[in-house]
Image (cartoon, rainbow, N blue to C red):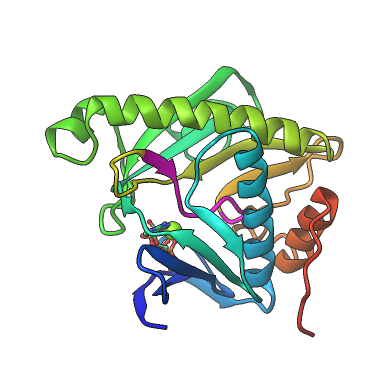
């Protein structure tokens, strides 16, 4: 397979089928724009299994994604998308950057789910932007942004239900979208505890990458707990 792109946490390969890619989830774990980096055994396979499970659930809710199927180990087969250079963050509860930015108390429940737009740029630290910036600089036009926000809110309904059923509060998460050959916008990338904040509903225990950012303990143990609660089986190498 030919490597098309290697990012911090995933690698993309072309396949024998035109328009289909393999997305490989790596064990590499980074935080603070790559300044903190560790390789954690089995993190990739856990993320691949969790993300695959979630994309399958989204398909059951009629939400279109790039997901085709889970392959062996940490590999997922996806449709090749023309990615939009923006990220959509959905927030249900205030945590992380929005608390610093707006002076909100961490853990305060927002009046309704909030969608935010960011420009994907490592050099600039993925800055918050609005629809005007996205449109003006050609990153996504207003109609595209409206479509992504609408899909993001549908994703939110499905995900809140899914996590709520297993005693997990979905605080916030990041989504990426891309366009298919026919120009329609679908959800791409990943939905994993790397890209979400997940808190235990009763104890508030963190079950996401903040465990790594804040040195709160073993990250793969926590991801394994998320997988188990969702009923996802993962074959881990010892
Ligand atoms: N279906 C898809 N088709 C093409 N590219 C995709 C698809 N899904 C995700 N991608 C892109 O693949 C890359 C995955 O790599 P990874 O997430 O490791 O990158 P990263 O180091 O986090 O950097 P980035 O800031 O680009 O996400 C991302 O750039 C993502 O936008
Ligand atoms: Mg990424």
Q: Which SS type dominates the magenta stretch? A: loop
User: Is residue 93 among the parts visible in the rendering?
Assistant: no
Residue shown at the point (78%, 62%) measured from the top left: 224
Left or right position of 106 against 128: right
Task: Please report the residue visible at 37 percent of the width from the left and 28 percent of the height from the top.
Answer: 147
| Quadrant observed for ligand 2 in the rendered image | bottom left
Q: Which residues are magenta?
A: 185-194
Query: Where is residue 71 drawn, in percent x and y?
Result: 62, 71
Determine whether 8 is above or below 186 in the image: below
Q: Which quadrant of the structure image shows residue 199? A: top right
What residue is drawn where x is 55% and y is 27%? 154
Image quadrant holding the C terminus, namely: bottom right
Query: Residue 147: in sight, yes or no?
Result: yes
Let me know if residue 15 is in the magenta part. no
Please state the horizontal and vertical placement of residue 45, each as a whole percent of the image. Answer: 66, 71
Q: Is residue 191 magenta?
A: yes
Horizontally, residue 85 falls left or right of residue 38, namely left
In this view, which residue lies farthest toward the left?
Answer: 136
Query: Can you name the residue that lies furthest to the front here?
Result: 17
Residue drawn at x 84%, y 50% as measured from the top left: 229
Which of the 4 quarters of the picture holds residue 52?
bottom right
């Amino acid at each position: 397979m030919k490597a098309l792109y290697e990012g911090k946490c995933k690698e993309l390969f072309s396949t024998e089928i035109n328009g289909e890619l393999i997305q490989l989830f790596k064990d590499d774990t980074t935080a603070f724009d790559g300044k903190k980096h560790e390789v954690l055994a089995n993190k990739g396979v856990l993320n691949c299994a969790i993300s695959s499970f979630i994309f399958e659930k989204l398909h059951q809710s009629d939400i279109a994604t790039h997901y085709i199927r889970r392959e062996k180990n940490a590999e997922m087969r996806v449709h090749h998308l023309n990615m939009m250079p923006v990220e959509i963050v959905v927030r249900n509860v205030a945590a992380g950057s929005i608390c610093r930015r707006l002076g909100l108390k961490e853990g305060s429940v927002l009046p309704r789910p909030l969608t935010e737009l960011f420009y994907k740029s490592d050099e600039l630290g993925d800055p918050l932007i609005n629809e005007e910036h996205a449109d003006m600089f050609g990153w996504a036009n207003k109609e595209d942004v409206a479509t992504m926000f609408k899909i993001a809110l549908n994703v939110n309904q499905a995900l809140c239900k899914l996590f709520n059923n297993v005693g997990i509060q979905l605080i916030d998460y990041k989504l990426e979208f891309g366009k298919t050959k026919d120009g329609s916008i679908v959800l791409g990338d990943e939905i994993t505890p790397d890209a979400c904040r997940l808190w235990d509903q009763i104890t508030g225990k963190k079950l996401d990458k903040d465990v790594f950012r804040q040195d709160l303990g073993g990250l793969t143990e926590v991801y394994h707990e998320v997988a188990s609660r969702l009923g996802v089986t993962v074959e881990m190498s010892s």
